[in-house]
Amino acid sequence: QVQLVESGGGLVQPGGSLRLSCSASGSIFSINAMGWYRQAPGKPRSLVATITSSGSTNYAGSVKGRFTISRDNAKNTVDLQMNSLKPEDTAVYYCNAHIFLDRATLYDYWGRGTQVTVSS
């Protein structure tokens, strides 16, 4: 069984920073891409940033230059450093990982989400 557990959400003022962390645990053979998505009230879940196992990154246009995704392949973790936060960044943030359970079995896993609220 594989679990993704997020941490680091909270309340921050506009212009502030937060760092989200996600740890994958369980019967993991290897992890392909990892990423962060977010869902604001009344809106669909959308991509924030992804990172491949080799370190290639992709960002949503709205966060480019403000957010930085990173991962530690040895620890099966992925972080999201969020700077210059805006009220429109308020959402539940979800960790995602494409995990191989063995050489041929690939599944898409999600964390339960962590709330980020940007407000004065």
Image (tube, rainbow, N blue to C red):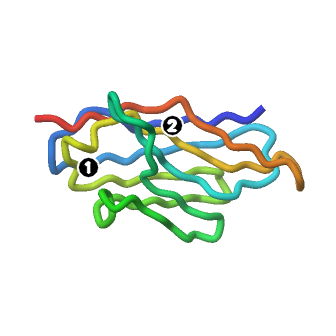
Q: Which of the labelled discs sits on residue 56, or is there none?
A: none
- Position of 102 with respect to 41 (left or right) is right
The tag earlier along the polypeptide, 2 or 1, is 2
Q: How far is disc 2 from disc 1 in space, using C-alphas?
A: 17 Å
Examine the rendered structure and indicate whether residue 30 appears above or below residue 55.
Answer: above
The C terminus lies in which quarter of the figure?
A: top left
Q: Residue 55: horizontal and vertical position, in percent?
A: 57, 69
- Position of 49 with respect to 2 (left or right) is left
- Characterize the local packing of mark 1: few (<14), some (14-19) or many (20 or more) Cα atoms within 10 angstroms: some
- Local secondary structure at mark 1: loop
Amino acid, disc 1: Ser
Q: Nearer the viewer, residue 17 or 99?
A: 99
Q: Which of the labelled discs sits on residue 6, or is there none?
A: 2
- Local secondary structure at mark 2: strand
Residue annotated with mark 1 = 17
Locate residue 10: give its quadrant: top left
